Image (spheres, helix red, strand yellow):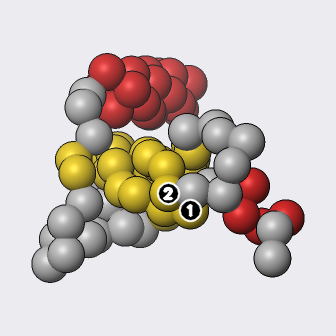
Amino acid sequence: MRVTLAITALLLSTASLTHANSAEPEPYTYGTKLDVASVASIKLEPTPYCEVTDAVMTYRDSSGELRKLSYRTLSDSCKNQN
């Protein structure tokens, strides 16, 4: 019984991750109501210059759904420049 429950939970987690990977991210706008329980990953568009770039955050909301949010942010290159 426990093995069946563990396998079912694993399959549901994999299915929700697959769904989140295939879904288009929701674009962030000012006023967007966020419900972030935990962050799974943040991916930045790589660039060698300090500039504004695109990012996508994959996260779980308070109901356990895996979601994606796209937003604009400064690139990682800005951390090394004054």
- Quadrant, the C terminus: bottom right
- Residue labelled with disc 2: 52
Give how far apart the Cα atoms at labels 2 and 1 are. Answer: 4 Å
Q: Residues within 10 Å of mark 1 (few under 14, many from 20)?
A: some
- Residue labelled with disc 1: 74
**Residue 11 x %, y %:** 43, 22
Identify the amino acid type marked 1: Leu
Q: Residue at x 66, y 57 (%)?
A: 50
Is residue 23 positioned above or below 44 on the image?
Answer: above
68 sits left or right of 17 in the view:
left
Q: Quadrant of residue 35?
A: bottom left
Contact between labelled residues 1 and 2, with CB atoms less than 8 Å apart: yes
**Which is more N-terminal, label 1 or label 2?**
2
Q: Residues within 10 Å of mark 2 (few under 14, many from 20)?
A: some
Q: Residue at x 32, y 51 (%)?
A: 69
Helix, strand or loop at label 2? It is strand
**Residue 81 x %, y %:** 81, 68
